Every structure is written in structure tokens, then in C-alpha cells.
Amino acid sequence: MLESKQIGIWLTIGVYLILLIAVGIWTGRKSKSVADFTVGGRQAGAWLSALSYGTAYFSAVMFVGYAGGTGLKYGLWGILAGIGNAIFGSYFAWKVLARRTRDVSARLKLKTMPQFFELRYGSRAMKIFACIVIFVFMVPYSASVYKGLASVADVLLGIDYKICMVMIAVLAALLLLFGGYLVQARADFVQGIIMMFGIALLILFVIRSNQVGGFAGVAEYMRSEHGFAPMSGSNWVALWATVLMTSFGTWGLPQMIQKYFGIRDDQQAKRGIKISTFFALLVAGGGYFIGSLCYRYFTADQMAQMGQDYIVPTLLKETGLPTVLLGIVLMLLIAASVSTLCSVTLTASSTLSMDFIRPLKNMQDKSVRTLTKILCVLFIIVSYVVANTDTPILDMMSYSWGIISGSFLAPYVLALFYKKLSKGGAWCGILGGFCTAIIPAACKIMTLCGSQAPQVVKLAGFGPQFACLAMIISIVFCLVGSAIFHSEKDASVQEFFYKGLVETE
């Protein structure tokens, strides 16, 4: 028999799920074309775009994997990751990228990042390479979302993590099958509101808990050995690698960039800067702050025994939250995870269907929409399988973000501002970043295959460091390569990209 507390939690979650499905059915009727399915007909306002961006950015991966991991390793210094996400990953990302990306995507009717590369550099091979990399290496990130929510459900609800992963997979699939971007964006709006209210209440109750002891307890913790404690040089390098990867990594992720594609106009893009930044500061700052208080609840030995993916879920359980708030917290994590999973799945699947398969089969719009939905379901199933491997959340996310952003951040961002960037330079940046970022992922695969060589195991844990290095190398290689490799064809391609206009969607 379920306890009354669990019944209250399930009822709260049930109300949320009904609301989400209602939004999906109502909005799904408006999704008629491929453009509606992938970029929402380019009619998203500031709130819709900003909250869709934020909910795609932050999921249970951040709340569970990163918040617990940074709290364990760096104490209160881990809050820098949340602040960095707000400043670099939201404010500057929107300030620098949103309006220019919206302009070029609207003029040229772009729907995916690979299409951006094909039109900017005149290279179908680059589009195909981007399709394959995005679809394949989005899977570890999607899998990390499953694991984050599953660990919470395991601790707070006592249900098997595999059952939880099946539930989130089914919900994400339903939302995408209802109608794609429009459904996802409106669902994200609802979920974004839930996340903001949920994290604000959670911070309040955690601070007031017996373990923390109110604001006086927080002040005492700041002065303790686990608060703002002195750190070694290697710890500072690792922390800043995490900050930079989780902040600037979003500048090269297709599921984040496509949020700019759907913005209605320039004015909405400007308004989205403030909304996105506030959301990130509250949600990411609050999430990392809660994780940084872990030493008020547990000893280092206790946390090592439970594993970093279970630190925050166990912390929430020990806080003794009221039933309704516990239900809201689970809604918050489900909301964050489902929205991120939908964004990642839609981006990966639409990229493969429109940019790789459609040109081979000469498919019509209706067939492409159907194929994209089928690929969404396939992607979700593959992600579920990968989620059942023995890989920490933080590692899976860093591999995915590192490889994709390391490959594509430079040729995307530089192309918005630097007209002399050539196709040869872009290829140098893409391949240089990819080869750098794939090293820790390759080492992790070797460990899963049985290799226990100390250097291999060590490199497998350096995902954030290699991700940052890959982004830097990619930028340098793009600029140097453009100075070396350029042709007359580059000029004509660039002319159309910066001044051309496509009339029909």
C-alpha cells in the first residue's frame, strides 16, 4: 500500500502530467508544416523563446549530476558554475547570437544547424558530417537526462530507476508526436514557470532545514573547511573548465541555437536577453547553491559511498520537505528533464531526417514530418539503452557537449561576424575540435571494454577540460585555416549568405 505522503506526491505529479498533455493536444493542432514542427513557424515571443531556451539548458543533469558533483569537490565555490551559466551561457549568448541568428535563419529559411553550414560554406559534405555528429553524440547527453531523473525517483519515490526512465521516455515521445516545436515550446513555458517557483521554494526550505540552520548556518558554513575553502591549482582548473564548458558550450549546441530560429522578430530577441538571464540565475544559481550545501548533511565518506549522482536526491529526502513541495520538486525535475529531452531529441531527429535522408529520397513535407517523428522515438529508445551503462551523469554530458560544441561553436559563431571565414578554415576548426574533444570519450569506451590502464581511466574523467580545449583549438584553427585555405567560390557563397533572401519556407 502506498503511504499517504506518496499518494500526495503522485497526485501532484498527476495534475502536472494532465496539464502537460492538455497543452500538447491543444497546441499540436496548429502544427501543419515542417517549419511548424521544427521552428514553430518562427512566431515565438520573448517569454516563449527564453523559457524554452532555459528549460532546454537546465535539466536533472544540472540539478543532480553537476550540483552534487561540484558541491562534493568544491563546496560553495561550485556556485560559480551557476553564475557563469547565467552570465556567459544566457546573457552574453543571447546578446551576441540571438538577433544575428534569427535574422539569417529567417532570411534564408533555415531550420537546422547543418543547413546553416551548407549555405554559409557551400559544402554539402559539411552538412552531412554535422548531421551524423549531432545525431550520434546527442545520445550521451539525452542518456544523462534519464539518469538524472531516475536517481531522484529512486530516492524520493522508491521506484525502480528503469521504470522511471521508461516513464520519462514515453512522456517525451508523446509531446513530440503531438506536434514538435510548438508543443515543446508551449510545454516549456509551463515547465519554466514551474521550475522558477519550485527552485525558489526549494532554496527557502533547504536554508530553513535543521541541517543547514538558516542564514546563520549558511554564514557559518562559509567559514568552514568545506565552504569557501582554499583549493589547489588543479581543482581551480577543473572548476573553471566546468564553468566554461557548461556556459560557452551552449554557444555551439544545435538544440540551443535552434531556439533563436523560432523568435518572431528583433524586438522579441532583445526582450529575451533579460528573461533568459533571470531564469538562469535563479534556476542554475539556486541548483548549484543547494548542491554546495551537501557537507551540512553528509560526511565525505558518506557521499563517496552513495555516489555523486545520489547526493542531491538524498539531500532533498533528508531535508524533510512537505508533501506538496516534494511533489513540486519532482515536477520541477520532471519538467526540466522532459523539456531538455524533447529539445535534444527533436534537434537530433529533425537534423537527420531533413538534412541527411530527405535529399537522398526526395521526400515531401508530410513524409519528412512522419520520418522525424519515427526518428524521435528511435532516438529516445537508443538514449534509454545508453543510460543503463555505468557512466556518471557529469561524464556523459561533458562528452556530448565537448564533441558537439568543440566541433561547431567556432564555425557557427565566427560566421555571424567574420565574412572572410572560408570553407577550408571551417573544416580545420571542425576537425580540430572534434579530434580533441573525442579523446576522453574514446578513453571511456575503452574502460567500458575492460581497459583499466591508469592513464586511460584518468583521461576518461577529463571531459570538461578537453571540451574547453576543443573550443579554443577550433577557433584558432578556423582563423588560421581561413588565412591559408580560401578560394574564389567562397566569396560568391558568402555574398548570398549575408545578403540573400529565400522567399518560401
Image: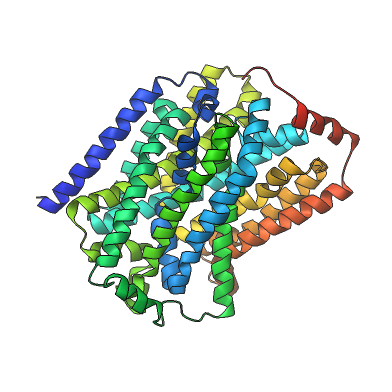
Q: Residue at x 9, y 50 (%)?
A: 1
Relative to 195, residue 42 above or below: above
Q: Is residue 399 visible?
A: no
Across and down, in percent, residue 211 comes to 26, 72
Q: Count how many numbered circles sit on residues in the image.
A: 0
Image colouring: rainbow
**Which quarter of the rendering shows the C terminus?**
top right
Relative to 149, residue 496 above or below: above
Q: Nearer the viewer, residue 296 or 126?
A: 296
Q: Residue at x 72, y 33 (%)?
A: 118
User: Based on the displayed image, in which of its 4 quarters is residue 152 positioned?
Assistant: bottom left
Q: Nearer the viewer, residue 485 or 58?
A: 58
User: Based on the displayed image, in which of its 4 quarters is residue 339 positioned?
Assistant: top left
Q: Nearer the viewer, residue 177 or 299?
A: 299
- Tell whether 341 sits left or right of 299: right
Across and down, in percent, residue 462 comes to 57, 66
Q: Is residue 76 visible?
A: yes
- Tell whether 376 sits left or right of 479: left
Across and down, in percent, residue 191 comes to 36, 41
Relative to 270, residue 357 above or below: above
User: Based on the displayed image, in which of its 4 quarters is residue 175 positioned?
Assistant: top left
Across and down, in percent, residue 377 comes to 43, 34
- Tell whether 71 sits left or right of 36: left
Q: Residue at x 83, y 50 (%)?
A: 481
